[in-house]
Image (cartoon, helix red, strand yellow):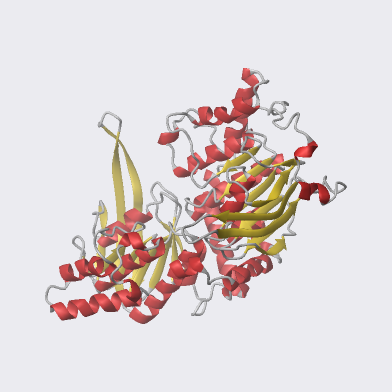
């Protein structure tokens, strides 16, 4: 194959400005990037958040000019953007008042002025149909799901008929099922269009499923290409089948190990210089009577109460709709021991978050019951700490002040110094020892989520509920915060339920993985006991003979249910 694109010594720096608008320091984002891309090749650029992946792809697209080096397309240096490079961003950037057809036609009319109206219309139709949206030509973006909007963006880029298709994390804002659907779509486009494709991603599995080579960017500042891995796994690559491929497992392990090595120096699992005070939280259930327990629970037998620390009994959730009652969750039954960690997994719309919000007391139960520590859950409170996908911090307060809001509620009897030690201990544990007095508004998404985790553990809750807490973060930042969560949970052994779309995350964290069927009328479809030693380490996990067996069981279940409303909407 001939080389179509060459990057030679690409470097880029940015000058920061202080609050007064004065010039500050200079940050070297990219440092002497060298890369050759062959015609028809699929390259994935994988790296940490903030490593300069978007800066690099923007330079290739001609949207920014590097400070040093040159970018050659077929031997000629690029000069700004051109129709030979089609770019798809993470956000869709569609015009909301135009239909799918007209959004794509805008690009076609701009770059193919030499073609007749009929030829341009045929090109629009062909590319829209290629991404599976022929049935939605007349819809506007507001009538499309997130996955469908991103398909429009891909169709628009393809309609320019570029020599190189540039994809800047186009799937990172989508749920796991929709992401899988669009990965399959990109693979089909690669096969049918024979385009050269460069994909920027933070997802190791996405890179391995799609790419011929994976180039790893080292962490910022001064990011460069550290290592390039050849993905010599035969195509077509089925995400369930490759899980059993020994070579795929070895390659995946090598990439994860290399990324882990790059990230070791910046590990965020922190030690604390303060000791956790020996003070118990306020008992919010003091004085409540056993008679308040639901009858169904009492009838189930008192002798097993010690092991029935948390019980979901014939749980139903029904929402009224204009077309009549909609049963979202049906006959959900689960018993949990004290100190057990459960992962709740399933496709979008299967009711995972509904179950979690009912357990938190934030969502009324239609029928059945939830009993925690011998008390029926019927109201929200700090005894049930919740960490949401968005951390819900007060932006005008510091990290310490945000955590203090909860600590002062559950430790009113503790001294001021004791409460401060509790706050500082957990902020240290989540790696925010140097950012305790930083405003939430000034923090990255990853830092805000650390504050949310610290706040949850600082409440010393009976039950910790995590609703996709890392869903908004790139997969490499997820790893870091998963380590934080594992390390902190190892010390507290709080009873916990975590909703997730991430199979590896579910297995890494849980004692059992509870898999839900598709909604509506969603219920528990399968429960997998994860018999892996604790404490768990990601690298050691990949060496464990049972890990890929567990992974295959969950992937197979999800593949079986890869059809309901969520799949159609994607």
476 over 395 or under it: above or below: below
On the image, the x and y values in percent for residue 231 come to 49, 72
Residue in the image at 18% along x and 76% along y: 120
Answer with the quarter of the image where residue 124 lies.
bottom left
Q: Nearer the viewer, residue 244 or 340?
A: 340
On the image, the x and y values in percent for residue 86 come to 27, 67
Q: Is residue 352 left or right of residue 463?
A: left
On the image, the x and y values in percent for residue 387 come to 56, 43
> Can residue 224 be seen by looking at this rendering?
yes
On the image, the x and y values in percent for residue 273 come to 63, 28
Answer with the quarter of the image where residue 60 lies.
bottom left
Q: Nearer the viewer, residue 171 or 208?
A: 171
Residue in the image at 33% along x and 57% along y: 56
Q: Is residue 514 left or right of residue 165?
A: right
Q: Nearer the viewer, residue 275 or 152?
A: 152
Q: Is residue 340 left or right of residue 55?
A: right
Question: Could you tell me how many numbered marks the image carries?
Answer: 0
């Amino acid at each position: 194959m001939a080389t179509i694109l060459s990057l030679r010594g690409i470097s880029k720096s940015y000058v920061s400005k202080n609050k007064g608008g004065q010039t500050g320091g200079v940050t070297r984002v990219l440092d002497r990037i060298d890369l050759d891309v062959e015609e028809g090749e699929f390259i994935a650029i994988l790296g940490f958040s903030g490593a300069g992946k978007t800066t690099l792809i923007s330079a290739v697209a001609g949207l920014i000019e590097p400070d040093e080096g040159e970018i050659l397309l077929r031997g000629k240096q690029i000069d700004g953007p051109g129709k030979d490079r089609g770019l798809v961003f993470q956000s869709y950037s569609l015009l909301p008042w135009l239909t799918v057809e007209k959004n794509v036609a805008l690009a076609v009319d701009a770059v193919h002025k030499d073609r007749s109206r009929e030829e341009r219309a045929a090109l629009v139709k062909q590319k829209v149909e290629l991404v599976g949206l022929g049935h939605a030509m007349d819809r506007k973006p507001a009538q499309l799901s997130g996955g469908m909007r991103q398909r429009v963006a891909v169709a628009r880029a393809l309609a320019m008929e570029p020599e190189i298709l540039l994809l800047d994390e186009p799937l990172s804002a989508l749920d796991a099922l929709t992401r899988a659907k669009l990965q399959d779509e990109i693979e089909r486009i690669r096969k049918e269009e024979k385009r050269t494709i460069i994909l920027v991603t933070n997802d190791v599995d996405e890179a391995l499923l799609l790419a011929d080579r994976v180039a790893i960017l080292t962490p910022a500042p001064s990011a460069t290409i550290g290592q390039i891995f050849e993905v010599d796994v035969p195509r077509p690559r089925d995400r369930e089948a490759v899980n059993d491929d020994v070579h795929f497992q070895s390659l995946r392990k090598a990439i994860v190990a290399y990324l882990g090595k790059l990230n070791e120096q910046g590990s965020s699992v922190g030690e604390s210089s303060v000791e956790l005070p020996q003070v118990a939280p306020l008992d919010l259930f003091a004085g409540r009577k056993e008679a308040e327990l639901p009858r169904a629970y009492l009838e189930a037998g008192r002798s097993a109460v010690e092991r029935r620390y948390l019980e979901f009994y014939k749980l139903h959730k029904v929402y009224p709709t204009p077309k009549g009652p909609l049963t979202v969750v049906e006959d959900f039954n689960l018993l949990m021991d004290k100190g057990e960690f459960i992962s709740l997994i399933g496709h979008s719309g299967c009711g995972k978050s509904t179950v979690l919000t009912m357990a938190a007391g934030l969502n009324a139960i239609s029928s059945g019951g939830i009993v925690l520590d011998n008390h029926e859950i019927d109201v929200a409170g700090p005894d049930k700490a919740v960490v949401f996908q968005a951390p819900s911090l007060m932006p005008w307060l510091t990290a310490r002040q945000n955590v203090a809001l909860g600590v002062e509620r559950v430790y009113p009897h503790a001294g001021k110094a004791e409460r401060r030690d509790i706050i500082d201990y957990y902020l240290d544990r989540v790696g925010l020892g140097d950012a305790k007095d930083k405003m939430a508004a000034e923090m990255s998404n990853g830092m805000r989520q650390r504050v949310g985790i610290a706040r949850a553990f600082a409440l010393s809750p009976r039950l910790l509920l995590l609703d996709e807490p890392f869903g908004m973060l790139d997969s490499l930042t997820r790893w870091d915060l998963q380590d934080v969560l594992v390390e902190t949970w190892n010390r507290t052994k709080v009873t916990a339920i975590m909703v997730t779309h991430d199979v590896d995350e579910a297995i890494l964290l849980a004692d059992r993985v509870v898999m839900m069927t598709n909604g509506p009328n969603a219920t528990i479809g399968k429960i997998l006991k994860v018999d892996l030693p604790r404490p768990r380490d990601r690298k050691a996990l990949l060496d464990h003979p049972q890990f890929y067996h567990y992974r295959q069981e969950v992937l197979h279940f999800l593949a079986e249910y890869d059809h309901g409303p969520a799949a159609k909407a994607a």
